[in-house]
Amino acid sequence: MLDIASLRAVFLGDRQADRVVPPSGFTAQLTVFAAAVMAFLAVFAMALSLAAGRLADRWGEELARSATIRIVAPLDQRAVQTEAALRILETTRGVASARALSDEEQQELLAPWFGSELALDTLPVPRLIEVIENSDGVDAAGLRLRLAAEVPGAVLDDHSRWRAPLIQAATRLRILGWASILLIAAAVAAMITLAANAALAANAQVIRVLRLVGATDGYIGQAFIRRFTLRAFSGAAVGTALGLIAMLFLPDASDAGGFLTGLGFQGWHWLWPLLIPLLAGAVAFAATGAAARRTLRELS
């Protein structure tokens, strides 16, 4: 149990008890290295989860307040029907603004697929109307009925068909990121348990001697818990620092505006990685305590 007395014992320690645990060697190097590597990976897993969360929130907020109307009509009727649709939108409740995209804007939208030399007047490309909703929102069903009655060539797309899958994908990425952190914590616990078991087995003779002179199992186990907790904490602190330094080299979201350029931490989210060394220390404390109690019972 992680109480005040245990915390004091971990941080203050006992020089005599600390001699039970070898200060260096394979187990010490393994614990520090494993904690550092896992903390480094946890920083990126946390960044992925937070970035996916920001992406889901942005898609949910921006796309929910926008819609598109396509005017699919012959060339000689397209302008008339576009004006009719704009007049309907002016009197539609929940519409903050509406405008027809210019030929240049539509050509820019189609350029990635058809090239920049596309001539819109030679192709039956529908005229697009961008609709921005206010906080009240638009009654999509009612607007479709009005458009069907007055503008036969108008097709309303409220983005609901593809908005939901995108938000779902971003939400699953966020869950995957946090699940990765839990798996990393489990891997740290397993590695520290193995290292603690190896250290306890290597010091079996010393433990027997300590028992002969009156040392309790709690006293002996506390020495192992303190040493491995501090090793995991220090290793995780180094790994977290290296991970944060690496995050500084990622491109900023403002450079391109894409998802892969916004994987770094933003604002107060930079404080989240500071919890990783504390989490590693808590995992090491619990794992070493369980290993010590089990091994000391076996050596009885």
Image (cartoon, rainbow, N blue to C red):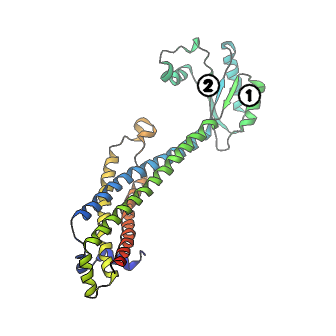
Q: Residue furthest right?
A: 149
Instruction: Report the quarter where the N terminus lies.
Output: bottom left
Residue type at numbered disc 2: Leu
Provide residue 81's location: percent of width, then percent of height.
70, 20
Q: Which residue is mark 1?
A: 147
Provide residue 6's location: percent of width, then percent of height.
37, 77
Disc count in the image? 2
Mark carried by residue 121: none
- Tell me what residue is drawn at x 23 percent, y 78 percent: 15
Provide residue 71's location: percent of width, then percent of height.
66, 22
Provide residue 32's location: percent of width, then percent of height.
28, 61
Quarter of the image for residue 165 reads: top right
Q: Secondary structure at mark 1?
A: helix
Q: Which residue is mark 2?
A: 128
**Foreground pick, 141 / 219:** 219
Residue 98 in sight from this viewpoint: yes
Residue 246's place in the image compared with 199, above or below, is above
Q: Earlier in the sequence, mark 1 or mark 2?
A: 2
**Foreground pick, 120 / 41:** 41
Q: Secondary structure at mark 2?
A: strand
Residue type at numbered disc 1: Leu
Q: Judge from the rendering whether residue 174 lies leftward or rightward of residue 205; answer left or right.
A: right
The reply to whether the C-beta atoms of the residues labelled 1 and 2 are less than 8 Å apart is no
Quarter of the image for residue 64 reads: top right
- Tell me what residue is drawn at x 67 percent, y 17 percent: 78
Q: Residues within 10 Å of mark 1 (few under 14, many from 20)?
A: many
Residue 119's place in the image compared with 273, above or below, is above
Instruction: Report the quarter where the C terminus lies.
Output: bottom left
| CA distance separating discs 1 and 2 | 14 Å
